[in-house]
Amino acid sequence: MSTIDAIERECADIKLANRDLPAFGLGSNTTAFSRMVEWFCVAMRKHRTRIHLNELSAEQLKDIGMTPSDARRESRRFFWD
C-alpha cells in the first residue's frame, strides 16, 4: 500500500467517523448523556486511527516522520488516552 492509498483510506475513515458523530451541537443545553456519546465517538475514532497507524509500512511511517517503534507505542495506547 502506498502512502497515498493510506491517506485516501484515512480520509474515507474520517468521513465515515464524522457521519457517526451525533447530529446535535454542543451548546449550553448539553446533557451528560450527549457529552458521553460525543466522547465515545471521539475515542473510537482515535482507536481506529491508531489501528491504521500500526498497519503502515516503515516507508510510510518515514514519510510522516515516525519510526516503527513510535508507531507501535502509539498504537498500544488506550482509546481513552
Image (spheres, rainbow, N blue to C red):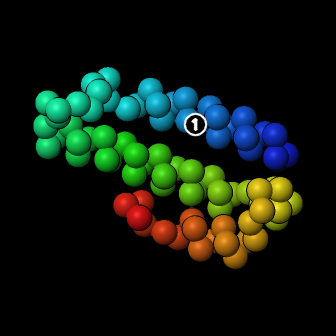
Residue 42 pos. (x, y %): 40, 46
Residue 81 pos. (x, y %): 41, 64
Is residue 6 found left or right of 43 in the rendered image? right
User: Which quadrant of the figure has residue 71?
Assistant: bottom right
Q: Which residue is mark 1?
A: 13
> At x 17% / y 32%, what residue is drawn?
28
Is residue 28 found left or right of 53 in the rendered image? left
Q: Residues within 10 Å of mark 1 (few under 14, many from 20)?
A: some
> At x 53% / y 70%, what residue is drawn?
76
Is residue 61 found left or right of 37 in the rendered image? right
Q: Nearer the viewer, residue 46 or 24?
A: 24
User: Which quadrant of the figure has residue 13?
Assistant: top right
User: Which quadrant of the figure has residue 34?
Assistant: top left
Is residue 65 found left or right of 18 in the rendered image? right
Residue 46 pos. (x, y %): 48, 52
Q: Nearer the viewer, residue 61 or 52?
A: 61
Which residue appears farthest toward the front when viewing the image? Answer: 28
> At x 62% / y 32%, what residue is drawn?
12
Which residue appears farthest toward the top when viewing the image? Answer: 23
**Secondary structure beneath label 1:** helix
> At x 37% / y 61%, what residue is drawn?
80
- The mark total stands at 1
Q: Is residue 30 above or below residue 32?
A: above
Amino acid under disc 1: Asp
| Residue 70 appears in view | yes
Residue 41 pos. (x, y %): 37, 42
| Residue 57 appears in view | no
